[in-house]
Each structure stands twice: as structure tokens, then as C-alpha cells.
Image (cartoon, grey):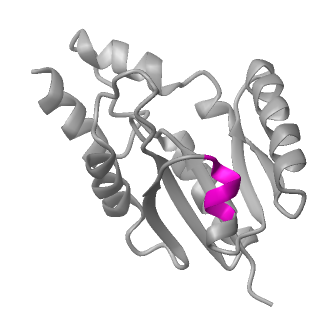
Amino acid sequence: MTTRAIYPGSFDPFTNGHLDVVRRAAALFDGVIVAVAANPEKRAPLFAPEERVAMIEEVVHGLPGVEVTTFRGLTVDFARSLSVTALVKGLRVYSDFEAELQQALMNRDLAPEVDTVFLMSGYAQIFVSSSILKDVASHGGDVSQFVPAVIAQRLKEKFH
């Protein structure tokens, strides 16, 4: 039986922490779909969904079983449409767990056949969030140690 998981998120921008989760999920599942949320009701993203997909595809190129796409709507509906029964969520700090637990419980109620798997970040990524990185990059700070090279370059281009 082939097991595939969806790793959903806004990934605006994709960080080394996100990449760590993708690599670890790829070791646990036969396939991992990095699913970029393209929901217009969220605040204006720095990068359009298509830009995020292109950057992430470049970063994960060569990782076996990993694909990247966008989706709209409920994550569990997207999972059902692909017959995927696992969602992967990365956790950095306790507040992440609290928010993700609420979402996982709602997802379980909406789609009992879809399980959520939590993967903890490593120490090197625990304090890094996309929001902080955007703030630092917007003020000319160097974020290259926290994001893949292609993302660092795109952030530099976006803000300069």
C-alpha cells in the first residue's frame, strides 16, 4: 500500500524549517505533496501562489516522491480529492501546537479518515517564522542562513 501525505501551508516564504519537515516527511511516506494554500481571504502574501510553487519546486527538486501544488478551500477536502489520508504539520513552539491541535481536531471531525502527523522542528529552526524573515528581509537584513538560496535571492529582489 502506498502512503502519501500532504504538507499544507502558506510557505510565504518557504524556510529551511519547512524543508526539514519535507525531508523528514519524505522519509516517513512514499510521497509528500507540498500544498501551497492559495486562499484569497488570507492577508496579502508577499509572493503569489504560483511564485511560491516555482520556488519550492526548485528547492525540493531531486527529493524522491515530493511534489508541489496549490490548493484552495479546506485542506481535508483537498486530501480527499487526492485520496490522501495523512496531513503533515510542522511545530516549532508550544503556541504552534495549540493552534495546530485545534485545527487537527476540527479536521478529524470533518474527515475522520484523514490523520494529522506532527513533526517537531530542530533547534536551528525553532525561532524562525516566515513573518520574522519577511520583516528582517524588508529592512535589508541577511536571512540567507534561514532559507534555501533561491528563496534568499527572491527575498532580496523583492525588497531591493
Residue 83 vertical placement versus 68 (above, below) = below
Q: Position of residue 72 (x, y in %)?
A: 49, 49
Q: Is residue 77 magenta?
A: yes
Question: Which percent across, then down, holds residue 129?
Answer: 52, 25
Q: Residue at x 68, y 32 (%)?
A: 123
In the rendered image, which quarter contains the C terminus? Answer: top left
* Residue at 37% from the left image edge and 46% from the top image edge: 148
- The x and y percentages for residue 62 are 41, 75
> Is residue 6 shown to the viewer in this render?
no
* Range of residues picked out in magenta: 74-79
Is residue 17 within the magenta segment?
A: no
The N terminus lies in quadrant:
bottom right
Nearest the camera: 53 or 143? 53
Side of 48 where 119 appears, left or right: right
Counting from the top left corner in percent of width and height, residue 152 is at: 27, 37
The image quadrant of residue 132 is top left
Q: In terms of image quadrants, where is residue 103?
A: top right
- Placement of 29 over or under 100, stated as above or below: below
139 relative to 125, above or below:
above
